[in-house]
Image (cartoon, coloured by chain):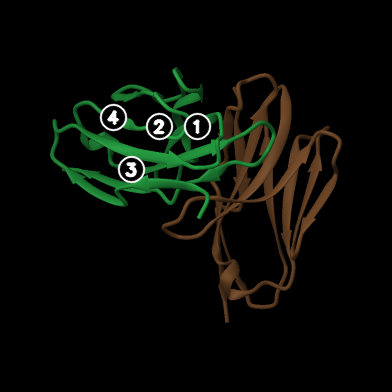
Amino acid sequence: NAGVTQTPKFQVLKTGQSMTLQCAQDMNHEYMSWYRQDPGMGLRLIHYSVGAGITDQGEVPNGYNVSRSTTEDFPLRLLSAAPSQTSVYFCASTQGARGYTFGSGTRLTVV
Amino acid sequence: KNQVEQSPQSLIILEGKNCTLQCNYTVSPFSNLRWYKQDTGRGPVSLTIMTFSENTKSNGRYTATLDADTKQSSLHITASQLSDSASYICVVIRHNAGNMLTFGGGTRLMVKP
């Protein structure tokens, strides 16, 4: 099925650990982005990419790294996990003026 | 500051009733406004996309309105169903801002039998 695939769906980390959240899309979309969703707040942009090899920071980039080596994949790396990074993470992609397609999310808990 | 405010934060209605969700924004310059439905534990799914020149757009039982002068939008749900229980998120995209979205906090709707 076409769409945005995120893995894992759930993850528990200890403070200081690192990990990579995976995001892949098979729609040949140029634009991909990562958001975090916290209770009572709207989704906030972490990083985005307008194409392979091009990334930029969003609203809340600290503590996260991204890379875009291919059009399909846009992984999000947590360098040293902190409890403040406990959240639900969504990856999304779009092409031009079309609507965004969101992944089903990764629920991350940092203890 | 570019913001999107939604009201109410939560709403409970009986199955079959209608309801209207509100969205006020200060995002500028405006490109388009989108309403998303987010089921619990799932990613947001697009309901409508409205540009500056569009006043009303429907998608089945969902009707979105936009007043670009007052910077207000509403989402009207007709003859609600239990499956309408979800969060509804208003999203505004700034013109010439690299596809950046500004999300509202959402309205959590619960439809009871």
Question: Chain A in the picture: what colour?
Answer: green
Q: Please state the chain letter of the residue tagged with numbered disc 3 in the rendered image.
A: A
Question: Chain B in the picture: what colour?
Answer: brown
| The one of B65 and A81 positioned closer to us in this rendering | A81
Q: Secondary structure at mark 2?
A: loop
Quadrant in which the N terminus of chain B is drawn: top right
Q: Earlier in the sequence, mark 3 or mark 2?
A: 2
- Vertical position of residue A5 compared to residue B85: above or below: above
Within 10 Å of the Cα at label 4, are there few (<14), some (14-19), or many (20+) other Cα atoms? some
Whether residues under marks 4 and 3 lie with C-beta atoms below 8 angstroms apart, the answer is: no
- Residue that appears at 18% across and 32% down: A18
Residue indicated by mark 3: A87
- Vertical position of residue A6 compared to residue B92: above or below: below
Q: Quadrant of residue B81?
A: bottom right
Q: Amino acid at mark 4?
A: Arg
Residue indicated by mark 1: A32
Residue indicated by mark 2: A74
Give the distance between the C-alpha atoms of the residues marked 4 and 1, in whole angstroms.
15 Å
Q: Amino acid at mark 2?
A: Phe
Whether residues under marks 4 and 1 lie with C-beta atoms below 8 angstroms apart, the answer is: no
Q: Nearer the viewer, mark 3 or mark 2?
A: 2
Whether residues under marks 3 and 1 lie with C-beta atoms below 8 angstroms apart, the answer is: no
Q: Secondary structure at mark 1?
A: strand
